[in-house]
Amino acid sequence: MRYEGVLTKMRTEITDVVQYYLVWENDFLNLNQALGKKISINFLKFQCLNCGLEKKIFRQGFCYDCFNSIPQAGDWVINPELSKAHLGEEDRDLDFEKRAQLQPHVVYLANSSDVKVGVTRKSQIPTRWIDQGAHEAIEIVEVPNRYLAGITEVALKEHVSDKTNWRKMLTNDIVDLNLEEEREKLKEYIPGEAKEYYIASNKETEIKFPVQEFPKKIKTLNLGKSPFYEGVLTGIKGQYLLFQDGTVFNVRGHEGFVVELKILV
């Protein structure tokens, strides 16, 4: 089977085991069905996810010009505490920023390698947790805008990490934690503006990933440096494909890369 198109982050569906899909303009592939099979990936060209032009990808699937101009790549995306739509202040496009920022957001704890704090739109749960490879996660607060979520994350990351150790996540070097207890420990550090939004009742969500075999040592595949790869798919976790020889491929890290993908066996 042969597929060709521009890579975007894998779409997911939470069932007993997470279902993963690569989606192109006119086709899609359920990657779970490719487990145990040999796959080849051939990098053909770049295609910016915003302007559609064949320009080298800078970050997040966008070319340099688009990354530095479109509202989807504003500083508030990575640093939610910089959000200003609730004040009526524009960064790049106030209408877009109001739609994105002035909606319910959740600050959460996720355990991918060690426990970490993060922020996402409420509508992105549990997708955000799956994308981070978290095997367990729980909400801390649900607030009405991105700014409140951002200042809460800033306060809490003084006491818990806001980073995922992706190598530990992919080798399954993990420990199970009682996230309800971890949440309770952090309650006192929530900023005053967000304290009323604390969630005390939610139970942690457990997530199982389709992995037949975890790599012991990791080799990362960068299509910009090695434009062709072939290997047996043994797992999918986070936004990574895991292969039998220890190679791991970050699909989201290659957004905007046009590839030819073949399932050979």
Image (cartoon, rainbow, N blue to C red):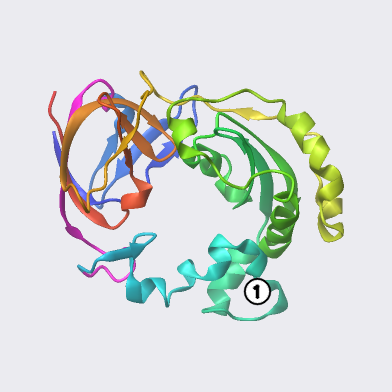
Q: Examine the image and state in which quarter residue 60 appears.
A: bottom left
Instruction: Classify mark 1: residues with Cα within 10 Å, few (<14), some (14-19) or many (20+).
Output: many
Q: Quadrant of the N terminus?
A: top left
Q: Which residue position is annotated with label 1?
A: 85
| Residue at screen point 70% across, 53% down | 153
Q: Secondary structure at mark 1?
A: helix
| Residue at screen point 40% across, 42% down | 11
Pick the front one: 192 or 100? 192
Q: Is residue 99 above or below residue 174?
A: below
Q: Position of residue 235 (x, y in %)?
A: 35, 26
Q: Is residue 16 above or below residue 124?
A: above
Amino acid carrying mark 1 in the image:
Ala
Residue 36 makes an appearance in the image: yes
Q: Examine the image and state in which quarter residue 224 appears.
A: bottom left
Pick the front one: 114 or 13? 114
Question: What is the tally of numbered marks visible in this picture?
Answer: 1
Range shown magenta: 34-53
Q: Is residue 59 above or below residue 127?
A: below
Q: Quadrant of the C terminus?
A: top left
Pick the front one: 137 or 124? 137
| Residue at screen point 87% across, 46% down | 188
Tell me: 112 left or right of 140.
left
**Residue 239 lies in magenta, yes or no?**
no
| Residue at screen point 71% across, 31% down | 179
Q: Position of residue 136 (x, y in %)?
A: 60, 30
**Residue 41 lies in magenta, yes or no?**
yes
Q: Position of residue 76 (x, y in %)?
A: 58, 67
Residue 8 makes an appearance in the image: no
